[in-house]
Amino acid sequence: MILFTQNHTRIWIALFFCGLLALGLLISKDYGLSWDEPIQRHLGQEAWNYAIHQTPDYWKIPLKNLIYGVSYEMLLAAGEQVLHISDTKDAFLFRHAAQFVLFWVTIVCFYFLCLKRFKKEGLAILGCVFLLLSPRIFAEAFYNTKDLGFLCFFFIAVYTGACFLEKPTLPRALIHGLASAFAIDVRLLGFLAPCLTSLFLMLDLLFSKKTVWPWSVVRNYFIFLGALAFFTVLFWPFLWPNPLHRLIVAIKMMSRFPWAGSTTLYLGSDANARTLPWHFLPLWISITTPIAYLFFFLVGTGNLLANAFKKKMALDAENRLDLLFFGCFFLPLVSVLIAHPTLYDSWRHFYFIYPFLILLALRGCSVLWNLKSDSLRRIRRPVIVFLIAAQMVLIAFFMIRNHPFQNVYFNRFAGKSMTEIRSRFEMDYWGLSYRRAFEKLLSEDPSDPIKVSVPNEAGTLAVQMLSPEDRARVQFTWTDQADYFLGNYRWHKEEYEYKNKIFSIDVDGTPILSVYRLR
């Protein structure tokens, strides 16, 4: 019984988070190099050098890359300089560890927001476990500084907004302004966080029994807006010459981003990234989220809407938070239907809405757990426990068995087997499997150099994660002159035409990259 006292519960929770941090740092070295990482690193370095030393090379970067916010990338570049990191392998290993630390901080904030909403440590920890046992999110928490970086900073901005709405003090106004600006300077959709804060503050004014707001609340709100504007410009050098004009340029260009790839594999066909069907995002979310989470999400969302339509929902602290979660999840999806932006590579651009799916799923768990129906009372809770436990075991087994390629997770809605799924949807579109393929090939073939052919840029970039000695042994050349061909099936759902396959990198028995001996 002593294990369940309040003090001991806090100790176990602290141990959970400490263990998670240690595990993440330990396995951060296992992940490969994603396609965008070298570009993002270069962008951050040039922005940092321009901000500190006024070097002009920042403005030589193509406009399509300049319009990306660089607040986080500048922070990572500063970390590399402080630690005197020069080799590319060391640099990307540092970035992977740093990215996980950011994700860990986000999970801590997630726990406290769950606690604020549900008032139960057990449900808050369950939410954290749901977030961790989300294979794609977990894997990309190590290497995806763009999409997972934005997820983290956007969630932190929403969390600080919830704290500000609860108690609109001056320190909370400044912190929320800083967090929101950092999110905006990672991706422009970060504007949603301060917009929702403003909306719910206005709703408080409309539905409050007080006829006049305290002057301190009005003052702190405008201080928040001032901090938001100041920090948004401060952390994004692209805006410095003409903030308003350049912000408009970035918004226009991001809505129709000029992606060189142009097509993405979707439902077995090469779909144009600029004219994707309305169901692209909902379907990707449905086939890459664990099914139990989707079930609880539908229950929680349905209950929230039912209460709203029946006018049984007072605008108290709990319901306000649920409405905030609802807005953070659904408003971005609605914006896609209206604006039709360029989308590609699954739904990674909208990963930032995923924590709010989990929060609404927790509401669904709570609703089912607390049903008052006598006929279901005896079987309801055991069924809920079994459903959650079974899903967790299956997900954990997949993640451990296929480490470090959790990014290729699909649920049963996507297809009966990974082989079928590979013919319908993109698999290792980041090219993360190239690193392991190169390491295995170089360990088995002592030749120097080894002549290699790859079908896309991800393969040539991957050698940056090798040791300097191994990197020097790899020579890229045309297929007719190469000793080996390495292909990750990007834009190539069929098997490659070469006959002598020597090994492959597999997920659940299906190759996500194959290596062929050519001569």
Image (spheres, rainbow, N blue to C red):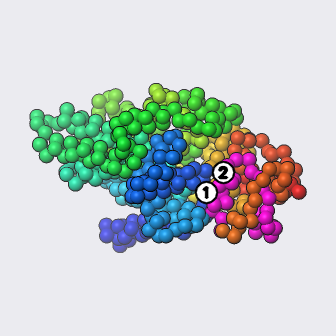
Secondary structure of the residue carrying tag 2 is helix
Relative horizontal placement of residue 366, taking residue 142 as reference (left or right): left
Task: Specify whether 331 is left or right of 225.
Answer: right
Among numbered discs 2 and 1, the one appearing first in the sequence: 1
Q: How many marks?
A: 2
Q: Are marks 2 and 1 in contact (CB under 8 Å)?
A: yes
In the displayed structure, 463 sits above or below 12; it is above
x%, y% of residue 54? Answer: 41, 54
Residue assigned mark 2: 458
How many residues crowd around disc 1 within 10 Å: few (fewer than 14), some, or many (20 or more)?
A: many
Q: Is residue 356 above or below residue 281?
A: below
Q: Which residue is mark 1?
A: 33
- Out of 470 and 157, give the one closest to the viewer: 470
Query: Residues in magenta?
Result: 440-467
Q: In percent of the image, x 44 and y 54: which residue is there?
A: 55
- Mark 2 belongs to which amino acid? Ala
Identify which residue is drawn at 53% across, 61% down.
Answer: 96
- Residue 397 position within the rendered picture, expressed as x and y whole percent measured from the top left: 61, 58
